[in-house]
Image: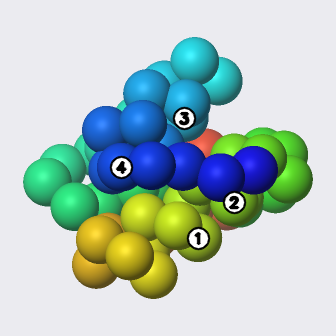
Amino acid sequence: MTFSSDDDALEFLKRYGHEESRNGVIRGDWRSFDADCRDAVGYLCAEWDFVFENVEGGGE
């Protein structure tokens, strides 16, 4: 999957129930992300300096 901007990737993640937990941080249980959502996270981390925090079990 390809994305053209950070907003594009964030909107894609939001459609699947994954959102930024705070500015520049995406937090969630990595196991709950399908391949396209993982691509969006990878794009955000590589191109926009986002950080992914894996929270096993989806806990806050």
Q: Which residue has dot 1 on it?
A: 42
Of 35 and 20, which appears nearest the observer?
35
Q: Does 8 sit left or right of 22 as displayed?
A: right
Q: Residues within 10 Å of mark 1 (few under 14, many from 20)?
A: some
Vertically, is 22 above or below 18? below
Q: CA distance from mark 3 to mark 1?
A: 12 Å
Q: Residue at label 2?
A: 39
Asked whether the beta carbons under mark 1 and mark 2 sit within 8 Å of each other, the answer is yes
The quarter of the picture where residue 47 lies is: bottom left
Going by the image, does 2 lie left or right of 20?
right
Q: Residue 7 vs residue 14: left or right?
A: left
Between the C-alphas of marks 2 and 3, the distance is: 10 Å
Residue count near mark 2 (Cα–Cα under 10 Å), binned few <14, some 14–19, many ≥20:
some
Tell me which amino acid carries mark 2: Asp
Q: CA distance from mark 4 to mark 2?
A: 13 Å
Chain-order first, disc 1 or disc 4: 4
Q: Residue at x 55, y 30 (%)?
A: 12
Q: How is the image coloured?
A: rainbow
Q: Quickly name the residue at label 4.
A: 5
Q: Nearer the viewer, residue 38 or 1?
A: 1
**Element on which disc 3 rests:** helix
Tell how many labels: 4
